[in-house]
Image (tube, rainbow, N blue to C red):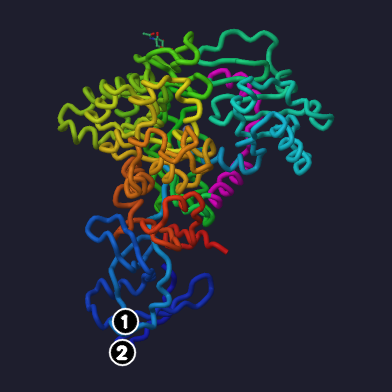
Amino acid sequence: MPSVSALFWAAYPLLLVVVFYQNGLPNFIVQPIAKSSTFNSIWNVFATTHCYASVTSLAPHLPQAHCFSVSNGKFSRVFRDEVPDGNNQLEPLRTGHVIPGLWDGHGHLAQYGELLDSVNIFGASSMEEVQQRLVDYKTRRPEAGTQEQWLRGVGWDQANFHGQWPVADDLEIDSSFQDLYVMLDRVDVHCIWVSNQVLSLLPIKIGDTPGGEIPAKGVFCDNAMDLVLKHYPKPNHVQKTKFLKDAMKELNKLGIVGMHDAGVTPTELRLYERLSGDADWTVRVNAMIECDIRNTFCPKDVSQITTPNGKFHVRSVKLFSDGALGSWGSAMIEPYSDKPSSYGTLLINTTTLSQLTHDWATAGYQVNIHAIGDLANRLAIDAFEAALKTLCPNKSPSDCKMKHRFRIEHSQIVHPNDQQRMVDLHIIPSIQPTHATSDMGYAESRLGTERIKTEAYRMRSLLPLKPVLGSDFPVEPANVFEGIYAAVTRRSPRTGLDASGGKAGWYAEETITLDQALEGFTINPAYGAFLEGKAGVIDVGAYADWVVLDTPLENLDVESLRTLVVRETWVGGKCVYQRE
Ligand SMILES: *[C@@H]1O[C@H](CO)[C@@H](O)[C@H](O)[C@H]1NC(C)=O
Ligand SMILES: [Zn+2]
């Protein structure tokens, strides 16, 4: 609350004028109090009121409004219209169409910021193009590539190299790349491709790597990545702080006010907590704990956190049951259709996963398990089912599920029987709609038509569970409207086309509606973070976060979602992004 230096009452018309000083500058609030005479309205003079052409609140009791007041970073009042008939003076001010601030239900904040600072090789369609982008980057950033500061990039896909894995020698591009330390993440960040200089750090003989693969000289997938990451000079706190804040700036431009960070280590959590009080910490973060050693129980290293400003929350833990589909790492009940010798890789067994789920839930944490393949999803559901049986002896089953809100991150390929079990057990699916449209080109050959038809990339089938939607940025672009487009059309937001190059949509029976998709990026992630009523909604008591669009979402032609840009983004009652 700014310091109030003067209060003036004017007799007629009934106006209350408040002068206060904020950042050393005088501010005036003029508030008519003629129509309302309650204490509430007196209190509201300390609030700022914003009116727009329309406000879509997503609050059931007042879904459409025009104005809201903000006090102390929260909505204190939401109402339809205050302009008396015939008073057109305020009308010109009322442009813009408001929706609640958007949330990404699964992303990686620091990695996203790091990507902004590294070579972007997403969409590079040949080895030559990758090499050209690396050379361009090195020209701009001559300091990159030393042992202390490796040259980093992300976004390659061997599908663009005629299906051939890249090798370390491919990074010997020219003399400027000699002896450089280079590490490039695959598009799904489940494999890395490194230079010979990085390989020279590793032992000459590498034994078995359970849960990992080394498909080519210089490429390391899943657990095998640890061999290299041991030597990677981790960004220090100063660099990491820059990554986080750069990421937030970009996310604000996209209308994003909050995100679930899918894997934050105990040390990073302490950094986040410290930074979350800064004025330029402009994205609310709900962090999932990832212990220093994956898939372990580390309650002594962490604690549950909600900062007073609501910018940082910790209440959940991330566990991993398998790898990713693109590198045949996801664990399958039946072998891959395009690699009959392989079932993928489980990173953990049932006993340990059940035990960890039970231990973390007993310690009061929400458990979110990464699961892509149908075997991994089954394992996660087994673990949740077993845990729920013992966790709430005195609670009704639905109260118990509500209390724990177990989640499956990705829920990508789920056997029909297990889809039903998810519904019965109220397990929250955390889904990335653009994964479906990014994978549709190869998923069918990898999984076969039957699995694609009945198991893979469900959206409408899991709708009763109010799926949390996200992008998994930086794996996919962070743009929520691209995610909404993919969910509504099952077509690529990049091309506007489905897997066969048409407009029908890839397995269009799994599309969801625009409203359902918007809920997936607002109120559903709020519930999935125990923030219902506080986030994803414009309602009294909720964080004052909103996005201003030029056109109401429901009036938009669906194709324009692909290019939609927001006008303004507000977090905690403050404007954090305004389009030029
Ligand atoms: C499961 O994994 C744990 C840890 O790796 C191991 O100790 C245990 O023996 C395994 N259990 C089974 C049944 O394989
Ligand atoms: Zn992820």
Residue 453: x and y in percent read: 35, 26
Q: Is residue 83 above or below residue 127?
A: below
**SS for dot 1:** strand
Q: Earlier in the sequence, mark 2 or mark 1?
A: 2
- Mark 1 packing: few (<14 Cα in 10 Å), some, or many (20+)? some
Ligand 2 within 8 Å of disc 1? The answer is: no
Q: Position of residue 95 (x, y in %)?
A: 42, 70
In the image, is residue 238 part of the stretch drawn in magenta?
A: yes
Return the x and y of residue 265 as percentages of the image width and height: 50, 33
Rendered image quadrant of residue 215: top right
Q: Which residue is mark 2?
A: 13
Res. 289 visible in picture: yes
Please state the total of marks drawn on the protein image: 2
The chief SS type of the magenta part is: helix
The location of residue 82, given as percent across then percent down, is 30, 76
The answer for how far apart the CA atoms under marks 2 and 1 are is 8 Å
Q: Where's the C terminus, which quadrant?
A: bottom right
Contact (CB < 8 A) between labels 2 and 1?
yes
* Residue at image coords 76%, 44%: 140
- Viewer-side residue, 220 vs 229: 220
Q: Nearer the viewer, residue 311 or 112?
A: 112
Task: Tell me if 253 is positioned left or right of 358 in this view.
Answer: right
Q: Which residues are magenta?
A: 223-250
- Whether 247 is among the magenta residues is yes
Residue 489 numbered mark, or none: none
Name the secondary structure under disc 2. loop
What residue is drawn where x is 54% and y is 62%? 579
- The residue singled out by tag 1 in the image is 32
Image quadrant assignment for residue 45: bottom left
Question: Outermost residue toward the right?
Answer: 175
Instruction: Give amino acid for label 2.
Output: Pro
